[in-house]
Amino acid sequence: MSNNPSGHAEPAMTKSGRKKIVSTAKGTLTMAAMAVLIITSILSLRGLPSEAKYGIQSIFYYLFAAIVFLLPFSLVCAELASTYTKSGGLYRWVSEAFGPRWGWTAMYLEWQTIVIWFPTVLMFGAASLAYIFWPESFDQALASNKIYTLVVALFMYWAATFNAFRGQRSANLLSTCGGLVGTIIPGIVLIVLGILYVCLGKHVYLTELPFFPDFTNMGTIVLAASIFLFYAGMELQAVHINDMNDPARDFPRAVFMAIIVIVAVYALGTLVIGVIIPSQDINLLQSLLVAYKGLWASFGLSWLGNIMALFIMVGVIGQISALVTGPATGLMAVAQSGYLPRSLQTVNKNGINKPILIVEGVFVTILCLVLIVLPTVESAYQIMSQMATIIYLIMVLMIYGAFIRLRRTAPGRKRGFKVPGGKAGEVVVCTLGILGALLALLLSFLPPSQITTGSPVVYVGIIVVGVAIFVALPLIVYSKRKPSWRNPDAHFYPFDWQIEGRKPDEVSKWTPGFEPTEEMVEKAEDEAIRTHASEPHH
């Protein structure tokens, strides 16, 4: 994922001394470069075991999610990003359509998704560490131990947080190394070894199943809903569409190229795990590591399985390092508009917001403690994955809603990229995307039948209560905001409806090619500050 979730560009100064946003030079991002950007921001090996339980059917799920989620959502985000090019990303998109209350909520939910996601990758990191040195029997026992997993997960997270306090450059170095060593190299090795394994006629556990799943048994397809979170991140990368020379032509091609590569890597990697491990023995946390050991052992090089575990561990550290600071940076940029107390907006000498990172760490620590109340590490891992998927899909539905609303309230706004197909294209893309997201969201409330989750009431109860709390939090914070929370030094570019002097749900007066003057922007910003200060606050 990107280290800049809110899509902020570097600020320059206007003649009057106010900050304004300057975009990257147009034409600096080629079609191939955009495809690579999408691929590297989405691909991850961590979730492959959950889909390997489906064997051949996993290909259906990968294709289905790509068609009903990744493709339509990519197109919608691209249009929004090319239309609303100022800083803010999804916060601006949703606020332009529904006002800042819901824009703030959407931005918060993106941050919350990553906070909930942290425990899953931390548990996976703990399992990877367990597989570095010891015999496999000891590895499996250690990786399944709740106390070991909890201690290692919290140590990794807080170590990454304290490292982030030193500045973004330190975090970026770990992130770059982790991406190469922990994802790209292991992914290539997994697929190449799997192909050699099959070609040499070694024993294959993968059994033939119907390509299409049994939709009458919802409990068996719950794990497949997590694929939507595998494909998460397009709302972050779409902001780069403005750097393409001909986005209307090149962006759809880049998306198709990326989808082919992503689906191929996910499908092949998943099938390799199914080839080497029987379906009933697949563990959501450990089976990727077991697969590496089994593949190398079949060639008489079992010790290389431990090396792969080390590589993957480096990748986990890189992911954590990249995402500890990124979401907090985006959240703070929006919070400076008046949505968090000023005490949470301060930065240290290295430009890092320590207060928000500490709050983030408290959230992650509390979520990791779910390990204590659930029967297995595997069930805790799955419940965090499902909760993150639900929160993320709620945000996705808000973005679809913003897209539909803005097509009607801002028909004259210049769009650098537009969803192909005119009105019919809009209907097809939104119908596919919304129905797909709703299906995955509803499935994510159910306990999967393939793993031991303990009491279904406790399992579902944790998800329902957790989601309710996380969705309510930004609305509560918004209702409690005070004029003093607004940072006078943070000059966020006004929304179109503020510049035009209208409400978000009123039709825009803008015509294609219109650019507001600096005076219009400053007047709208001053009015927004006055409005914020005069609104009733608690």
Image (cartoon, helix red, strand yellow):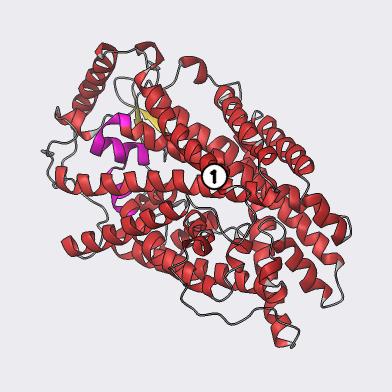
Please, what secondary structure does the residue beneath circle 1 have? helix
Q: Could you tell whether 112 is left or right of 311 in the image?
A: left
The answer to which image quadrant residue 348 occupies is top right
Q: Is residue 137 left or right of residue 143?
A: right
Q: Is residue 80 magenta?
A: yes
Where is residue 96 shown, x and y percent of the image? 25, 37
| Residue type (three-letter) at the residue carrying disc 1 | Val
Q: Looking at the picture, how far across and down is residue 200, in whole percent?
A: 75, 87
Residue 223 lies left or right of residue 420; in this view the side is right
Task: Identify the magenta region.
Answer: 78-101
> Can you say which quadrant of the picture contains the C terminus?
top left
Secondary structure that dominates the magenta span:
helix
Question: In terms of depth relative to the viewer, which is nearer, 359 or 191?
Answer: 359
Q: Is residue 402 above or below residue 180?
A: above
Residue drawn at (85%, 61%) of the image: 136
Q: Is residue 333 above or below residue 180?
A: above
